[in-house]
Structure formats: structure tokens, C-alpha cells
Image (tube, helix red, strand yellow):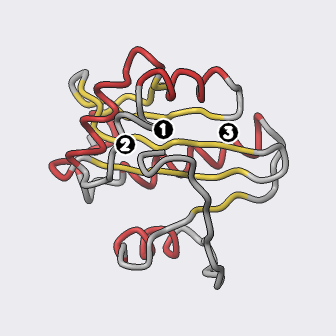
Amino acid sequence: MTDMDLVDLCTVNDKDCKELLDLWRRAGLPVRASGRDAPEAIARQLASGAQRVLGLRAGGVLVAAAVLTHDGRKGWINRLAVDPAHRRRGLAQALVAEAERWFVQDLGLEVWAVLVEEENVASQGLFEHLGFQRHSLVYMSKRLRSDA
């Protein structure tokens, strides 16, 4: 029996928002609970059809998740999070594999990408191990509010 035999793949929906935000906090991801991570914002994002949240549950508890988005030509893996108590068990790799399956088989996409913060060397190593190539880019954003 492997560690993956003990987890169940699921689609996280708007009813799971609190659990998703709790996972992000445990994993050390910033949470903008009054902005784009507010339950109503997440529900709107999921309803758009351009976003899917994959999760892994162990004993019914959400222990890993990834937000998947696409613009019709490129898929994105966003906010990949694994509970620290469940790391180094292949959960992140399983989420990436399911993301790639969804991009290719369900959406017909041939390109998918991630943005990883420069200081997050663990995530960089994971994605390089999974065959992602590093590119030099300048990320720019414009926000209506600081919590957006």
C-alpha cells in the first residue's frame, strides 16, 4: 500500500471554501479572505468555467489542492498547496498529473504553465523534476485594491 492509496482525488467546490482557505494557511500560502479568496469570489471563479480546484482528501480532510485555470489556449496550475503534515508523499505530483490530464484530455490544451515565487525553491524543484522548463519573465499586475 502506498501513501497515494490513502487519499481520494476530489473536485473542490464553493461549499469547501473554508476548508480550502484553512489548507492554504497551513501550507503557508497568503490568503486574501476579503478579496479574491473570499467565498463569494471563489464561487464566482468556479462558476466561470475557466477554473477548477482539484483536491486530495485523507480521512475526509482536505490535505492538498491546486487551482487550475485556462484561457482556452494555455492552462495554469496555481496555488498548489500540500499540508505540511502530508508532504513528501507524492501528493503534489499526483495533483500535477491530474491537472495535465485535464488540460490535455478534457480541454485539448498543449501548453500549461506555473508561476513560482523566486524564494520558493521547493516548488521550483518540484516543477523542474516534473519536466517544466524555466523561463525568465517579468511579472506585472495592476490591482483595484490591495487585498485583491
Q: CA distance from mark 1 to mark 3?
A: 24 Å
Q: Are marks 1 and 2 in contact (CB under 8 Å)?
A: yes
Q: Position of residue 141 (x, y in %)?
A: 61, 62
Residue pictured at 51% horizontal, 34% vertical: 53
Residue 40 against residue 30 in the figure, above or below: above
- Dot 2 lies on which element? loop
Residue lying at the far top in this picture: please name it.
Answer: 15
Give residue 49's quadrant in the image: top right
Q: Position of residue 107 (x, y in %)?
A: 79, 38
User: Which amino acid, by three-letter code, is at mark 1?
Assistant: Arg
Residue 56 against residue 119 in the figure, above or below: above
Q: CA distance from mark 3 to mark 2?
A: 27 Å
Residue receiving disc 2: 32
Residue pictured at 46% horizontal, 48% vertical: 94
Residue receiving disc 3: 102
Residue receiving disc 1: 36
- Dot 3 lies on which element? helix
Q: CA distance from mark 1 to mark 2?
A: 6 Å
Give residue 70's quadrant in the image: top right
Residue pictured at 78% horizontal, 45% vertical: 71
Q: Position of residue 67 (x, y in %)?
A: 52, 42
Is 99 on the left-hand or right-hand side of 59?
Answer: right
Q: Are marks 3 and 2 in contact (CB under 8 Å)?
A: no
